[in-house]
Image: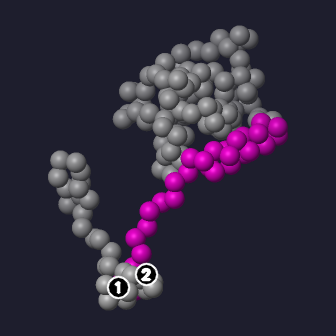
């Protein structure tokens, strides 16, 4: 079981000094924060940092109480990064300790959860000594065929 989106949002508000036991968070503030959380996690996912966060298809489809299934090692990085993103919106400044802890947590997460982006090498790259059994000196040319989805339909024209 992982944190819910609400737990991430409330923890981020606590980090910037807007804890719900002192200040009543309005539903609009919670919805705005969960949109920021979804946006941040989509950016991380696009950068190759895959932690299993369920990205909604649109901002309206995001449920504040849905479970994220994020591993526990990512909780601090997500909370502190979200706090840093929310603070300016509420006229708050993130403490140097929070920034440092966020960087340490994010770097630790990168070591575990980041996947290198795949890249196809050009056909002018030598294949190496292990590939000579096939009398092929260079790698195969790059695949430039359009991507296909699972229904064998083209994604792009």
- For the residue labelled by badge 2, is the local secondary structure a helix, a strand or a loop? helix
Query: Measured along the vertical axis of the image, is residue 136 above or below residue 111?
Result: below
| Residue 26 on the magenta segment | no
Residue 43 in sight here: no
What segment is highlighted magenta in the picture? 96-125
How far across and down, in percent of the image, does residue 46 sit? 48, 50
Q: Which mark, by number, is residue 107?
A: none
Q: Is residue 120 magenta?
A: yes
Q: Residue 42 appears at what percent x and percent y?
A: 48, 42
Q: Main secondary structure of the magenta part?
A: helix
Instruction: Kindly identify the residue that appears in the image at 48 percent across and 37 percent down.
Output: 52
Q: Are discs 2 and 1 less than 8 Å apart at CB?
A: yes
Q: Which residue is mark 1?
A: 133
Q: Nearer the viewer, residue 93 or 5?
A: 5
Q: Is residue 77 left or right of residue 58?
A: right
Residue 93 visible, this orientation: yes
User: Looking at this rendering, what residue extends furthest in the front direction?
Assistant: 133
């Amino acid at each position: 079981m992982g944190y819910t989106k609400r737990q991430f949002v409330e923890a981020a508000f606590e980090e910037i000094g807007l804890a719900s036991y002192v200040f009543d968070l309005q539903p609009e503030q919670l919805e705005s924060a969960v949109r920021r959380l979804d946006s941040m996690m989509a950016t991380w996912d696009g950068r190759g940092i895959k932690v299993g966060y369920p990205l909604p298809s649109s901002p309206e489809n995001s449920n504040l109480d849905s479970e994220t299934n994020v591993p526990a090692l990512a909780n601090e990085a997500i909370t502190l990064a979200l706090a840093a993103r929310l603070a300016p919106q509420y006229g708050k400044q993130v403490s140097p300790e929070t920034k440092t802890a966020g960087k340490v947590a994010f770097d630790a997460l990168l070591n575990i959860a980041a996947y290198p982006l795949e890249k196809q090498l050009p056909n002018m790259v030598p294949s190496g000594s292990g590939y000579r059994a096939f009398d092929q000196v260079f790698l195969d040319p790059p695949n430039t065929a359009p991507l296909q989805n699972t229904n064998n339909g083209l994604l792009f024209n």
